[in-house]
Image: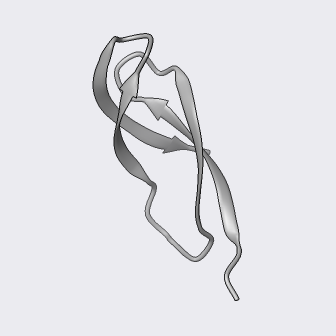
Amino acid sequence: MAKDDKVILACSVCLSRNYTTSRKKNSTKRLELMKYCPKCGKKTLHKETR
């Protein structure tokens, strides 16, 4: 049974760490989501940090 892994999402424009989420542990690619960044004031691409 695969456990969930806790990850932090950072804005690709201003690099602020805005969101935390979980994903499956056996996933190999980094998570990328379009989310709202309160610092930029618009929807930007958020990437998983390590």
Camera-nearest residue between 40 and 49: 40
Residue 44 placement, left or right of 5: left
- Judging from the image, the colouring scheme is one colour
The quarter of the picture where the C terminus appears is top right
Q: Which quadrant of the figure has residue 43?
A: top left
The quarter of the picture where the N terminus appears is bottom right
Give the image location of residue 42, x and y in percent: 28, 18
Residue 49 placement, left or right of 38: right
Q: At x 58% / y 77%, what residue is drawn?
A: 26
**Residue 40 against residue 37 in the figure, above or below:** above
**Residue 19 against residue 41 in the figure, above or below:** below
Residue 15 placement, left or right of 6: left
Q: At x 67% / y 82%, what residue is drawn?
A: 2
**Residue 7 against residue 4 in the figure, above or below:** above
Give the image location of residue 21, x and y in percent: 58, 49
Camera-nearest residue between 20 and 25: 20
Q: At x 30% / y 28%, what residue is drawn?
A: 44
Q: At x 47% / y 21%, what residue is drawn?
A: 15
Q: Which quadrant of the figure has residue 30?
A: bottom left
Total labels: the figure holds 0
Residue 30 placement, left or right of 4: left
Give the image location of residue 39, x and y in percent: 44, 10
Give the image location of residue 23, x and y in percent: 56, 63
